[in-house]
Image (spheres, rainbow, N blue to C red):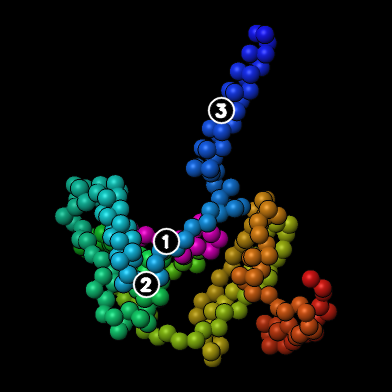
Amino acid sequence: MSNVLLRCGGIRASTTFSLAAYTVGALYPPPIATLISPRAASGPSLDPNSPAAHAYTASIEAQLQSLPLLQTHRSRSDADEWYETRPYFNFPEERRVNNLTAGALRGPGKLATAPLIRSRKDESEIIAFVHVGRGLCGHDGIIHGGLLATLLDETLARTAINNLPEKVGFIVIRTKLVQLQGRKVWVQGYVEDTNGLLLTDAKAMFVQPKYAKLLNTAANRQAMGEPDLTNDIPVHLADGNTTEVEMRQR
C-alpha cells in the first residue's frame, strides 16, 4: 500500500513540475524558441489618428520618459553641459511625407514616437533614445539590421554635419556573391545613381544559424522574391546579360 502511495505521490509531483515548467516556458520562452516559432501578435492600429494609436503612442512616450538610463543622464553632475531635443517633433507635414524616418517609418508599431536626444552644447557628443516597434523587424522579433544602420547613419550625421543629404531619387543597388564556405557566405554590394556613379559600397559576411533547418524557409523565399518556376524564363545577370535556365519542378 505504501509503495502505491509513493508512486501516486511521485506521479503527482512529476505532473505538477511538468505543468509548472510548461507554464513558465510558455510565458517566458527561451530566445531560440521565439526565433524558430515567433509569437503571433496583432499590430497596433494602422491609422495614426485613431484613439487606439494615440493611446499606444502615449504609452511608449511614458515608457521612454521613465527609462532609468535617461533619468540618470538627466541628473548627472555635468547635466548643465547638455541640452535635450526631439528631432521631427515639430516637423512640417509637407516635409514629413517625403522623409523616411520622419514619415514612412513613423507610426504605431514602427517609430512610434520622436527620438529623444541628449546632446552636449558643443555638439561633440550625443546620446539618442529611440523606440523601435515590431513592425520594423527583418525576422520576426529581431529589428532589421538595415534599419539600425539607417538610424546610426542619421545619428552620426547629426553629430558630424547636423544636416541630411539634399538629393533623393532612384538608386541602383548591385550585389554579388564573393565567397561561400560552409555556413558562411560573403557578399559585396554597390549603391549607384542611375548614371552609374558609385555612392557607397559594402562587403558583409552572413552566417547561417545551426537551427536554420527548423525555420520556415518557404516563407523566407516568398518574402525575398523568387522566380516563377512553372515556366522557362531568363535570369537577368548583374552585368545586363541573360541566361536561360532549366526550370525544376516544385
Q: Please determine whether, in this image, residue 24 is positioned above or below residue 120.
A: above
Q: Is residue 142 magenta?
A: yes
For marks 2 and 1, the one nearer the N-term is 2
Q: Does residue 28 appear in the picture of this structure? A: yes
Mark pair 1, 3: CA separation: 37 Å
Relative to 71, say whether 188 is above or below: below
Q: Considering the image in quadrants, where does the N terminus appear?
A: top right
Instruction: Name the one closer to the observer, 186 or 235.
Output: 235
Q: Which mark is residue 16?
A: 3
Q: What residue do we see at 25% from left, 47% from top?
A: 72
Residue at the spot of label 2: 47
| Residue 171 % position (x, y) | 51, 84
Q: Quick check: 11 above or below 27?
A: above
Identify which residue, 158 or 112, lies in the foreground.
Answer: 112
What is the total number of numbered labels drawn onto the structure image?
3
Is 121 on the left-hand or right-hand side of 215? Answer: left
Local crowd at mark 1 within 10 Å, few (<14), some, or many (≥20)? many
Highlighted magenta segment, given as a residue range:
129-143
Find the residue positioned furthest to the bottom: 195
